[in-house]
Image: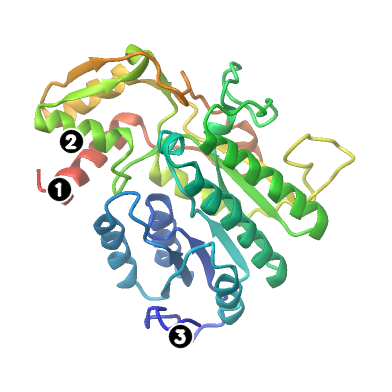
Amino acid sequence: MSNDTTANRRTGTATAPILVTGVAGFIGFHVARRLLARGSPVVGIDNLNDYYDVSLKQARLDILKQMPGFAFSHLDLIEGDRLEGLMRDQAVRQVINLAAQAGVRYSLQNPHAYTQSNLIGFLNVLEACRRAAVDHLVYASSSSIYGANTCSPFAETDMTDQPISFYGATKKANELMAYTYSHLYRFPCTGLRFFTVYGPWSRPDMAPIKFTKAILAGQPIDLYNYGQMQRDFTYIDDIVEGVLKVLGHRSRENPAGLGEAAEDRLPHRVYNIGNHSPVGLNAFIALLEKALGKKATLNLLPMQDGEVLDTYADIGRLQRETGFAPTWSFEEGIREFVAWYRAYYRS
């Protein structure tokens, strides 16, 4: 175990810890907090990079460090040997891989960051899981892999060979890599295609924080495609519930997550995880205005490279196989988000 591992590691329990990568990130923080709250020990890793405000990541991490059963190591997935050593020393049996270079637009500016984190880093995760013979790897994919797909709602059986951002391409690659490792080494892997996650502690580069900040400051909001887009916004608590349901649902006998060939049975599965209820950007802004008590100024712009018009998740497979069902309405979620924003940013 490295010297930078937090001292408040698990004690007096035979329960193997769950490794959560990207633990200081938006989804990783919420997943780890829920696991700890239910009594599951967590080993969290994060490289705390400066893609966005590191103080927000640190604030999330400070909350986790106060919870019993949490251990943290400042570690980058690119450090394959350290990752393997950590998993071996902590006797990790389950892994939730949420670490990645995020952001569709940033992938147009700095594609090399996505190669390092999302491709080489993910390969290191797969190798570490193989060597540790883990019971289950759950990993983050993205609705971005649907790219130019025009079928709606998006289903796992749809073609995903036309991602229109490099970020989406790396997530497609992750699914293929996990499928191959599942085929070669027969360990259970499950990919989750997240659809526009929002809620308290969200990333500053995402629309809820960007739009809220602009409205409160009286600054214009850039709306691409003149606001004519929809997103399947999914509240963070629903996402966490889905992640934990999937974690306890290993796909040893399910058909392959890619291709669906009945004769090719592998312990690999891919699920959409969303709200199955897309919201137009104008309706989204109207709810923000209502919650903030202030009108927005809009700057209508043409479509931007890498963006998709609409996202809409078919979550039938996840519902049938795990019992997942989103419970948060968008209006309720926006109220919770705004309450957190005002408290955290004192605005």
Residue that mark 3 sits on: 11
User: Measured from the top left, where is residue 212 in percent x and y?
Assistant: 20, 33
> Which of the colour schemes (rainbow, by chain, secondary structure, one colour) is used?
rainbow
Label 1 with label 2: CB-CB less than 8 Å? yes
Instruction: Give the x, y percent position of residue 46.
Output: 43, 63
Residue behind mark 1: 345
Residue 287 to residue 176: above or below: above
- Label 3: few (<14), some (14–19) or many (≥20) C-alpha neighbours in 10 Å: few
* Three-letter residue code for mark 1: Tyr
Task: Look at 84% across and 35% down and name the residue there.
Answer: 261
State the image coordinates of residue 227 (x, y, percent, origin top left). Answer: 33, 15
Q: Secondary structure at mark 1?
A: helix
Label 3, secondary structure: give it.
loop
Disc 2 crowd, CA 10 A, few/some/many (<14, 14-19, 20+): some
Mark 1 or mark 3: which comes first in sequence?
Answer: 3
C-alpha gap between disc 1 and disc 2: 10 Å
Q: Amino acid at mark 2?
A: Lys
Q: Tell me the residue that label 2 is attached to.
A: 213
User: Marks 2 and 3: in contact by CB < 8 Å?
Assistant: no
- Can you give x and y, in whole percent of width and height, for residue 300 in the image? 27, 14
